[in-house]
Amino acid sequence: MLLKRLAFLPCVLAVGFASSARQTSTTVTQDPQAIAVLQRSISTMGSSLPSDSVATGSVQTVAGSQASLGTIQILTKGSAESLVQMTMPDATRTTIYANGQANELVGATVTISTLELAVTSQAPYFPIPLFAAMLSDPDYSFEYVALESSNGVSLHHIRTWDSYATQPGLQSLSSLSTRDIWIDANSSLPQRISYVSRPARGAVAGTTVDVFLSNYQNSSGVLYPSSIQKSLNGTPWASISIQSVSFNTGLSDSSFPIQ
């Protein structure tokens, strides 16, 4: 395994992520309050981690004045594999994540993601596998930032990052693995997951990604967000509507091919 598992104002986002970079360290931080919030969120969404999940729906993307409508499929297996495939009028785009590595595909053309991109490539749309991966990794750090309010809703703000404490050769990736998570204090359901996707270390521009999750629906005893909004650098980019979800379907590792 090459690498182990891993609607606020724009100015607030900038401050938040600057703070993330300062606070991320290679010393493991185990904030009991943050861990308890994440554990409670997993328990609320489902009593256990499904062996796999398959979700399908529609997606609309916006680039400038151009809007495109297509379909989306989101697969997960365990807590360390995910695949997101968007079939749009111009091309089919796929992001595959497996055990710390990632590939990007446009049609049949494969691009192997850098380690820097891979650390945030696991799909955030179904939060249980992502949260389970973090909580099961002894190198992962958890910080309770604050109880915040947005549109009258109280939200637990949690910050997570991989310290790579047991992998000194990868510790320069630690600050790139930071994710900020907001969880509804009343329902314990995740409302937003934010991170900066960077193609390389150093003075390289990154893309701030904000994923907003809502309208959770019960499918076979598991809550899955049926409405997902994704913004890039503060600009709405994709609106996803999940229409069908299945769990424990028997997916194998071959469904998540990494080159």
Image: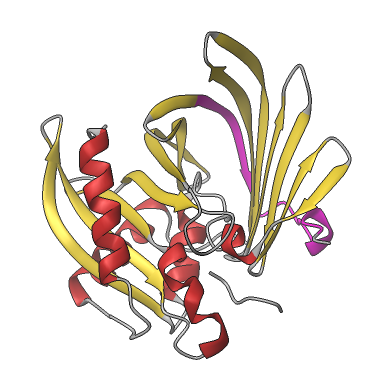
Which x, y percent locates residue 224? 47, 41
The residue located at (38%, 36%) in the rendering is: 212
The residue located at (89%, 40%) in the rendering is: 108
Which region of the structure is painted magenta? 238-257
Q: Nearer the viewer, residue 15 or 248?
A: 15
Res. 242 image quadrant: top right
Display coloring: secondary structure
The residue located at (41%, 51%) in the rendering is: 195
Res. 10 image quadrant: top left
Q: Is residue 53 magenta?
A: no
Q: Left or right: where does residue 249 sit relative to residue 42?
A: right
- Name, please, the residue furthest toward the front: 203
Q: Left or right: where does residue 139 sit relative to residue 51?
A: left
Q: Is residue 246 magenta?
A: yes
Which x, y percent locates residue 69? 64, 15
Is 73 drawn above or below residue 249 in the view shown?
above
Is 93 drawn above or below residue 99 in the view shown?
above
Q: Nearer the viewer, residue 219 or 183?
A: 183
The residue located at (11%, 53%) in the rendering is: 147
On-image quarter of the C terminus: bottom right
On-image quarter of the N terminus: bottom right
Which x, y percent locates residue 189? 31, 47
